[in-house]
Amino acid sequence: MSKPMWSGRFTKTVDKIVNDYNSSLPFDCRMYKQDIRGSIAHSAMLAAQGIISEKDADDIRNGLLSIQEDIDSGKLTFDSDAEDIHMFIEAELTNRIGDAGKRLHTGRSRNDQVALDQRLYLVDESDEITKLLTDLIHNLRNIAIAHTKTYMPGYTHLQRAQPITYAHYLTAYIEMFRRDRERFEQAIKRANISPLGSGALAGTTYPLNRLMVAEQLNMDSVSLCSLDGVSDRDFAIEFASAASILMMHMSRMSEEIILYSSQEFKFYELDDAFSTGSSMMPQKKNPDVAELTRGKTGRVYGDLISLLVIMKGLPLTYNKDMQEVQESLFDVIDTIKAVLPPFIGMLKTMTIRKDNMEAAALGGFTNATDLADYLVRKDIPFRSTHEISGKLVHYCIEHNTSLEKLSLDEFRQFSELIDEDVYDAISLETCVNKRTLTGGPAPETVMEYLRSVE
Ligand code: ARG
């Protein structure tokens, strides 16, 4: 086993069992690009400040770029006993360029280095995640535009409540996913702050230019307390929290996709390419994508809880426990990137059974509120009209019919004030079209909203 960089004060080499246990290389190797980028910025700044020579900085830069190339091409692999990606790269650099490599770490600690790498990694990933979310939002918007007049029941308690449209239903999810996108953007804004210059915990006496490093790395600012700089992992927790809320939304939608594609609802028909069969039951078509999305939600929550528990009770500043943050964070990123594309594909390809949605909206007395409101317009107080409408519903249940199918005579047994115009007042179209308040289901209102969605 090669000598670790910190071996000066030790008289024994680390037991192999400890070295393997301690090593983060198997998972932090995925941050090699960020580590190299951070080191190039740090060394350029060291040279600009006259702390190392320009020649050393050039050698460091070229050496690091050649390492990156070799890792990219697969020529250099991570099969070493290095403790982590930071030591792996530094050792490799020193192998390649000699003493200049040993100057790279001047005024820096792995504590501020690892915090930087994780922040850069998150920022790098955020573009793809935001794009996927935007793709999801746009797809929902496009589906919704085609369905502003597709009636369906809106539910409370999973009981038919009032008629809405499928477009209106989708706008609920569009709103959720827009908030999710905003949450990610805000989390990334707070992640994009450079901790370099915090040193191990107490900063450093070298005249570093922290802002210069941040600028080179395209970061918005520098952390303002060195103790916090090395021990803060809020950015990971915030990201995992935004991801958990996103997963919760996708899980709720998945639950409805599972329900709505069942034979009991038949609102959706999943595309064959986005569903699976059963090895035993020939007739089965299973909504695996939706179910797996619901399942992965538990996994992301687990990661969030891991992060919160890892950080809870840690004394300032850096503690090795914090190495454990990485795997949970990476799992969150990997999971949401894995969930979104099939989820979007499933939504894009499924068939919407307008006929069944509309039939369901016509059943279940979803127009009972509108009947009560109709009588309010005849100057009966709402509490009384609610009672009359309820009695009419009861009558319909007993006679196995629906409100709009009652004759005027039948209506009039419950209120003399009911006229021919009742049929128009309680039609599906009227129930939906009259709800024009902001946020309501009227086709024009929903269309106006959809036009504003970016
Ligand atoms: N691999 C370590 C981590 O991820 C890097 C920081 C090590 N610092 C230390 N003081 N041992 O946390």
Image: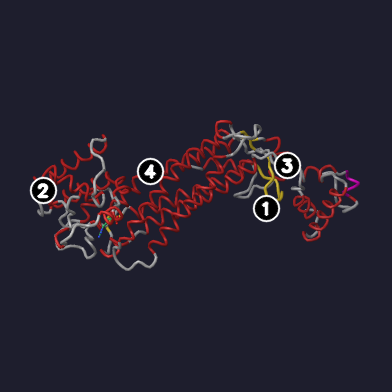
Some atom of ligand 1 lies within 8 Å of the CB belonging to the residue at label 3:
no
Q: CA distance from mark 1 to mark 2?
A: 68 Å
Q: Nearer the viewer, mark 1 or mark 2?
A: 2
Task: Residue under label 2, please give it.
Answer: 100
Residue 173 falls within the magenta-colored stretch: no
Count the marks: 4
Q: Are marks 1 and 4 in contact (CB under 8 Å)?
A: no
Give the image location of residue 234, x and y in percent: 37, 59
Give the image location of residue 327, x and y in percent: 37, 51
Task: Residue under label 1, please give it.
Answer: 156
Label number found at residue 360: 3
Sequence-wise first label, 2 or 3:
2
State the image quarter where residue 260 is shown.
top right
* Dominant secondary structure (helix, strand or loop) of the stretch shown in magenta: helix
Helix, strand or loop at mark 4: helix
Q: Are marks 4 and 3 in contact (CB under 8 Å)?
A: no
